[in-house]
Image: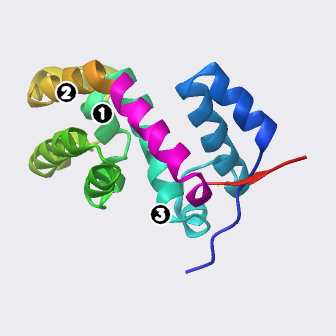
Amino acid sequence: MESSREVFIVESRLISAAQRGVDAFLEEIVGAIKETVGGELNEVALKHLNGEQITLWGYYVLREELMDGGFVQLIYNGYGPFFFDNPFAKAMRLWGLKDFSKLLYKAKSFYDKYKDELTKPCSDDDFMGLFERFPEFDDLDDSFIEDEEYITDCIAHYVDEHIDQFVTVKTV
C-alpha cells in the first residue's frame, strides 16, 4: 500500500467555510481531499488516503446518491461494494452515528439479497421500474432523508473535533 498524501487546507478558507455552515465546511474539506488525489474516488485515490478521509468522501458520495435516487440508485450506480462490502457502517458507528449505522446494516441486508438484480445494466425505463420492484428500500430512503441534516451535522462535528486526521491546516 502506498503512503497517504498530506491534504492541505488554508485556515482562512476553512474558517470562512465553517461560517457559511456545515455543508460548506464539509465541502471545503472534501474538496481539498479530492484535489489532492485527482478528483475521483477510485482505487488509485484510495491508496493515497487514510481511512478517515476515505470515509468522509464516501459519506459525501452516499449522501449525494441517496438524496438523488435512494439506495436503489446508489447500488445501481456501482457503489454497493464500497458501502456494503467494506466497514463503512462500522465507521459511522465509531463516529457516533449508531442509528445511521443500523440503517446502513439494514440496507446491506437488502443489498445482499438483491444486488444481482440491482446491478444489471438496463434501460432508463427498466431502471425506473427498479424502484417499484424493490420497495424494501423506500423506508430506508425516507429515514435517511428525514435524518440527513442531523447526520451531516454530526459528521461535521466529528471532522472538526478530529481535523488533523482529515487535513493539515496551514496559516498563510
The residue wearing badge 1 is 122
Q: Which residue is drawn at 47% across and 39% down?
A: 157
Instruction: Residue under label 2, please give it.
Output: 130
* First-in-chain label (3 vs 2): 3
- The answer to whether residue 57 is visible is no
Pointer 1 and pointer 3: residues touching (CB < 8 Å)?
no
- Residue 113 at x, y = what percent? 9, 48
Q: Earlier in the sequence, mark 1 or mark 2?
A: 1
Q: How far apart are marks 1 and 3 (CA)?
A: 33 Å
Rendered image coloring scheme: rainbow
Q: Which amino acid does label 2 sit on?
A: Leu
User: Marks 3/2: CA distance?
Assistant: 32 Å
Q: Which mark is residue 51?
A: 3
Question: Position of 86 compared to 162: left or right?
Answer: left
SS of the residue at dot 2?
helix
Q: Is mark 3 on a helix, strand or loop?
A: helix
- The reply, left or right, for residue 129 in relation to residue 52 is left
Q: Main secondary structure of the magenta part?
A: helix
Residue 106 lies left or right of residue 28; in this view the side is left
Q: Give the range drawn in magenta.
A: 149-166
